[in-house]
Amino acid sequence: MQHNHSKHAETATRNVHHGSRAAHEQHSHEQHAEHHHMHHEQHITQSGNQHAPMQHGGHTGHAGHSEHAGHSEAMFKRPFWISLVLSIPVVALAEMVQHMLGYHLPTFPGSAWIEPILASVIFWYGGWVFLRGAFDELRVFKPGMMTLVALAISTAYIYSLAVSFGLVSGMPFYWEMATLVTIMLLGHWMEMRAIGSAQSALKELAKLLPDVAERITPSGTEKVPVSALQMDDVLLVRPGSQIPADSVVLEGESQVNESMITGESRPQHKQPGEEVIAGTVNGSGSLRVRVVRTGEKTMLAGIMRLVEEAQQSRSQAQALADRAAYWLTFVAAGVALITLIAWTIAQGFNDVTLERVVTTLVVACPHALGLAIPLVIAISTALSARNGILVRDRLALEQARKLNAVIFDKTGTLTKGEQGLVRMLTQPTVREDEALARAAAIEGDSEHIIARALMSAARERHLSLPQVSQFQALPGRGVQAQIEGRTFQVGGPRLLAQAGVQLPTAFVDTVRAWGHSGQTVVYLLEERTVQAAFALADVIRPESREAVAALKKQGIRVAMLTGDSQEVAEWVAKELDIDEVFAQVLPEHKSEKVRELQRSGAKVAMVGDGVNDAPALAQADVGIAIGAGTDVARASAGIVLVKNDPRDILRIITLSKASYRKMLQNLAWAAGYNVIALPLAAGVLAPLGFVLPPAFGAVLMSLSTIIVALNAQLLRGLRLNDQSA
């Protein structure tokens, strides 16, 4: 199975790329500078669009995309090596090099044509990628990086041929042209490798799905391609194998590693009735599962679709960089023309003048500007996806660094959205664990919300439950059963009232406070005596306290929004140390509360479950849907969190600030390089005896792009899981 994984990664993107590319080209007039990296940013995009295997439910026909991804690198790699080998004799035969190094090669009839013949092979074979790129750019009236390089090598080559054929006098530029092509090929090859690695996380996602699944049939099992799976198929998932489709467990228990999808580091225990996600890895137990989603509806497909959308969404900084790169092409061409005129006036048109023009064309690097932002976008999007943070809209991630207010929806966001035991009070003679075990045992067979809360609390404490007998429901009051011959009852205030039981004096004030906080109170009675009282409420997530404290530590206002009563809202706010509370707010009025904070000048993030918070999520500067689980396509939010972890808000802010810093660093380097390099190439320091040779100009140009690429790669070292404080 493993040997096909690279194949998966390669073609996983084909079909989806056509759709995304069409949308991309639809507004190409806005992206007038993309020509500077048309061969490179397309590579970014194509490496990342790995949705196709999902679209048909499987991985059939895995042969297209990666051939392009691989071809992008091979497009420079093979010509580089051939050009390098051919450049050695070209450089060795150059009269200038022989003179500089003090040696002389013997000549023979026709030897003068060895250099131009080899140089011609280098120009047409090694330089073809630049010539073709220039043709593509000029065909759509978008001159860019390839146009500048093609102009430089064509000028040097044509002038050199003219010298060889005796049409003009001077020194040929064959060795300069050969080294120029070779160095440019090396630089672009290195650049392709850097860009390709920016998409490694997405390629890994495409590898997660197995080739085949083991489907259970009346006669046993059969191996079928994942593409052939249908809804409600029952599959056997063996220990250590990958889950082939989103499914529900029918039989068996196991620990499933979901870290590659959700970012959750600990394996998750799965038992009958629970969902498993396509691409995750089964642990030591065998599972029988029923398929509930296949193809493009799986969570894995949704994640890759969202990541692709994020990488293609326009960034404000990228739009600025694209415009700068676009105009830099014309600036470079203009400087080259001025250089030609100035040097021709100063000393006539000769090989020195031509050398300055060629160097000026080569040294300009709109490419570094053009790649400054897309590389950061590709890496930050992949980094966030690995941590369960799915960026649907790049602008949302950009805005996150400016946030100074965060509004949390209460239910399902700060709390678990389910009743749980939050307080307990017992008689001095009764141990808490003993009282809870009895209450849970009596309620054990019920599906009532109170029963589930008590049973869950007992499981969390790892309590063993006593045997019960003579179970009896008490309509409207609670339940009754015997434990070891003693009669116990579990119920609410009505049970006490109808039985005429008085609360112990020590319980009265505490139970009253629970009621005022909106908590449900349940009692355990033995005969007519209250043994224990349990307070049930929507359980606060343990991560919520840490998240709120960390946000406030950064000076960010934290508010809570809920449709619950004021009492319940204030209790949760007090527990979490939240100062601003909006209670009893209807879903349709939540967006108005967001506007209130925005009118006060705040940059607001709204964090909700994405179901009834859509207007508020859309109104906020940054809308964040939390706890999406397998439903990752929540359209109202710019950022979707797979997990129910409010601390991810801190991670979003950290990633936003870090990626923005990288963008600025790259832009500053790319712009600063061009400001310095262009005048040097034009020869402004020639009166002081310093001129920039064309080959060195090519080295500088390649280095500038590689530095931008490597700087973007440093973003990979960001530890988002350490950003919770």
Image (cartoon, grey):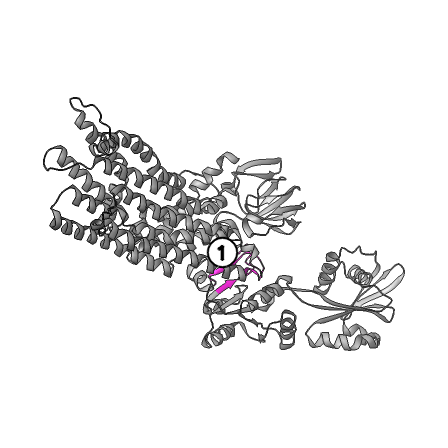
Residue toward you, 321 or 88: 88
Instruction: Please say if 293 is above or below 548.
Output: above
Give the residue at mark 1. Answer: 390
Residue 191 appears left or right of 300? left
Q: Is residue 626 magenta?
A: yes
Q: Is residue 634 visible?
A: no
Q: Is residue 612 magenta?
A: no
Q: Is residue 237 visible?
A: yes
Quadrant the C terminus occupies:
bottom right
Which x, y percent locates residue 625? 52, 62
In the rendered image, the residue lying farthest to the left is 167
Circle 1: residue type: Leu
The picture quadrant where one finds residue 130 is top left
Residue toward you, 41 or 94: 94
Which x, y percent locates residue 173? 20, 37
Residue toward you, 462 or 682: 682
- Residues drawn in magenta: 623-648
Prevalent SS, magenta region: loop
Residue 244 appears left or right of 153? right
Which x, y percent locates residue 583? 58, 75
Q: Residue at x 20, y 23 (%)?
A: 106
Q: Please tell me whether mark 1 sits on a helix, a strand or a loop.
A: strand
The picture quadrant where one finds residue 131 is top left
Residue 640 appears left or right of 370? right
Which x, y percent locates residue 645? 58, 60
Residue toward you, 686 or 207: 686
In the rendered image, the residue lying farthest to the top is 108
**Neighbourhood count class around disc 1 (C-alpha, 10 Å): few under 14, some 14–19, many 20 upward:** many
Q: Residue at x 29, y 33 (%)?
A: 83
